[in-house]
Image (cartoon, helix red, strand yellow):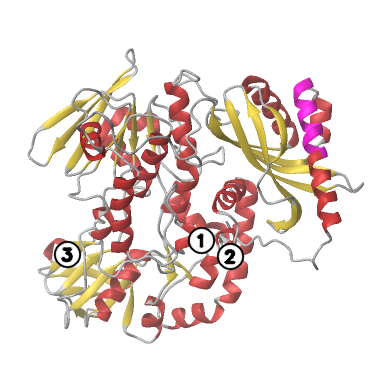
């Protein structure tokens, strides 16, 4: 996340690399001894005053981050004692310790492992040199890698012949029986068979957790296939691999929506995920005494089945699932066609039509470009300034996924980067650097009538992504169409009202329209919580996604205020990074290692 490129010194000697590894190994040995002895002074001496620690399920059973040496000291000592953390050392088989620049600071970065009473952990450390040359900790990331007896790594091929001797049932027969849940209840029910739900289900299956995924669409992948015709992913393919089943090298650099949807369908089949399609999740209520939910799902034929899972995961959208329909003056009087982008599929058939796209985020730009390419006359109505970056600048946000770093290491680096105070400052610096690169693009867009900003407090498009899931555009063609006049810009403050045949401006001019597309985003998933679980649960949960006071994304990938209820949110890369930790947390609850509702929460 954000430009953090390893340095490229002149071919350091092997001896120097060995010496660096030895120094880092010695730092871990001192940390291990100090934690075992609960020696506060010794632990304190290993870290700089402005240090940070982030834990993903390993020492806290949740997602937590702590900043400041005194706070880190207390939390780390407590967590290590509670979970039996020991054996800290360099990770075998990972990239050796190296000097890199992270968040504009030169650090020694290394991957590490450690043991726990209930399994194994791994993480990343970033060390800086003190004035005396000694290495001291600046960042420490600890994550739960494996649970004892339920490793589920996928690294070892499971035994078996692929069929049963002495039985008339083959693999397909067994899969049909497993997916039917005719004689049992699922341990976990996941609502939504998009990328987030499927990745979590794949990890849960590897851990032996009986999981059912339900989706209202006819086929897995329709959540992507049914979106607008021109959609393609805006992040590189090497960043959006799915766990256990990466994309082949023959796939393009940016995946078209239908190709990605087809891959999700194949993924569900080949990862043996129990999935009911054409099945709508209606909601659930929790029996606290029994520790189970009563969930209702409705099949395509109208029949409703009750299920009794112990855990429910909502994976129905990135940051929300219900379209946001703004109250636009006079829109009800408009006689033409009105669609939200969730209903808009293609610009085909609109040749010669006059279209207004309300909203200038990603879907607004993509929709406007698709309509223009299909011969429509297109205007975009802007209601607030937008962050626009070139593809070049956007790709600077995640260099670890493009420089040959192994995917598992890249995900650990990404997780280590999400220390809020430092991340915030890094985003500001990267936004300023990106603005210099995109200066001519921005100048031309403003000349064409588009209003730009650089995000809250100059934190750019990535903060808008995490906080709102929108309000930005990574340019894949629409900006050029705006600059050359194929797409016109209209500011909402210049609009009086919609009328029957178009939109009337304050000066009395009427712009004739045939079509209005509302690219106005989606409600926060808290609205989904109220819909599925009731207002009381929604109030307990609060907002889903967006950074909380603890520096973590609210209710994302971790236990919530309601036992047994979880949310999968955000993009493909983030879901891949964090799905395994939620899966291991759920498995730990199933194994009795932690009780729901009893975890560290800051």
Residue 326: horizontal and vertical position, in percent? 26, 56
Residue 271: horizontal and vertical position, in percent? 35, 44
Asked if disc 1 and disc 2 are in contact, CB closer than 8 Å, the reply is: yes
Q: Would you say 172 lies left or right of 595 here? A: left
Mark closer to the chain start, 1 or 3: 3
Query: In whole angstroms, how far apart are the C-alphas of marks 2 and 3?
Result: 36 Å
For label 3, the SS is strand
**Residue span colored magenta:** 26-37
Looking at this view, is 494 or 252 the one in front?
252
Query: In whole angstroms, how far apart are the C-alphas of marks 1 and 3?
Result: 30 Å
Asked if disc 2 and disc 3 are in contact, CB closer than 8 Å, the reply is: no
The main secondary structure of the magenta stretch is helix
For label 1, the SS is loop
* Residue at far left of view: 301
The label on residue 431 is 2
Res. 381 in view: yes
Q: Is residue 15 above or below residue 135?
A: below
User: On the image, numbered disc 1 is attached to which residue?
Assistant: 455
User: On the image, numbered disc 3 is attached to which residue?
Assistant: 338
């Amino acid at each position: 996340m954000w430009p953090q490129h390893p340095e490229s010194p002149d071919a350091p000697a092997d001896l120097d690399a060995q010496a660096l590894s030895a120094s880092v190994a010695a730092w871990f040995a001192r940390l291990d001894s100090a934690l075992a002895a609960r020696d506060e002074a010794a632990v304190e001496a290993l870290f700089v005053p402005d240090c940070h620690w982030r834990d993903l399920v390993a020492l806290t059973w949740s997602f937590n981050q702590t900043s400041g040496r005194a706070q880190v000291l207390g939390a780390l000592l407590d967590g290590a004692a509670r979970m039996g953390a020991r054996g800290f050392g360099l990770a075998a088989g990972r990239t050796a310790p190296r000097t890199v620049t992270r968040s504009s600071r030169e650090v020694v970065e290394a991957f590490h492992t450690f043991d726990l009473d209930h399994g194994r952990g791994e993480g990343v450390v970033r060390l800086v040199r003190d004035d005396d040359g000694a290495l001291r900790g600046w960042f420490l990331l600890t994550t739960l890698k494996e649970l004892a007896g339920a490793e589920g790594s996928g690294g070892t091929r499971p035994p078996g012949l692929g069929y049963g001797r002495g039985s008339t049932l083959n693999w397909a027969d067994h899969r049909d029986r497993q997916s039917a849940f005719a004689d049992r209840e699922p341990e976990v029910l996941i609502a939504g068979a998009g990328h987030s739900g499927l990745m979590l289900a794949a990890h849960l299956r590897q851990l032996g957790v009986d999981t059912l995924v339900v989706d209202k669409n006819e086929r897995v992948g329709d959540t992507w296939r049914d979106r607008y015709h021109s959609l393609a992913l805006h992040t590189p393919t090497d960043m959006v691999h799915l766990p256990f089943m990466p994309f082949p090298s023959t796939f393009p650099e940016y995946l078209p929506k239908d190709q990605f949807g087809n891959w999700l369908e194949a993924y569900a089949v080949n990862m043996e995920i129990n999935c009911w399609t054409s099945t709508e999740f209606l909601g659930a209520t929790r029996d606290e005494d029994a520790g189970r939910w009563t969930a209702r799902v409705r099949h395509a034929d109208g029949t409703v089945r009750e299920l009794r899972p112990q855990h429910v995961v909502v994976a129905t959208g990135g940051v929300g699932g219900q379209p946001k329909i703004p109250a636009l003056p006079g829109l009800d009087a408009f006689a033409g066609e009105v669609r939200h982008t969730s209903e808009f599929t293609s610009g085909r058939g609109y040749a010669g039509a006059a279209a207004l796209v309300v909203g200038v985020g990603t879907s607004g730009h993509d929709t406007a470009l698709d309509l223009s390419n299909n011969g429509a006359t297109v205007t975009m109505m802007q209601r607030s300034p937008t962050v626009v970056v070139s593809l070049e600048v956007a790709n600077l946000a995640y260099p670890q996924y493009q420089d040959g770093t192994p995917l598992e290491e890249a995900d650990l680096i990404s997780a280590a980067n999400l220390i809020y105070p430092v991340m915030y400052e890094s985003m500001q610096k990267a936004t300023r650097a990106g603005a210099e690169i995109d200066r001519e693009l921005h100048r031309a867009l403003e000349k064409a009538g588009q209003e730009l900003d650089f995000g809250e407090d100059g934190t750019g498009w990535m903060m808008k992504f995490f906080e709102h899931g929108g309000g930005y555009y990574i340019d894949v063609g629409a900006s050029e169409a705006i600059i050359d006049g194929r797409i016109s810009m209209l500011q909402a403050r210049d609009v009086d009202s919609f009328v029957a045949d178009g939109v009337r401006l304050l000066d009395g001019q009427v712009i004739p329209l045939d079509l209005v597309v509302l690219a106005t985003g989606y409600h926060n998933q808290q609205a989904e919580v109220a819909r599925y679980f009731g207002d009381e649960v929604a109030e307990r949960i609060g907002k889903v996604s967006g950074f909380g006071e603890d520096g973590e994304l609210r209710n994302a990938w971790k236990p919530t205020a309601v036992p047994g209820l979880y949310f999968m949110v955000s993009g493909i890369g983030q879901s891949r990074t964090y799905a395994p930790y939620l899966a291991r947390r759920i498995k730990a609850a199933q194994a009795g290692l932690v009780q729901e509702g009893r975890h560290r929460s800051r």
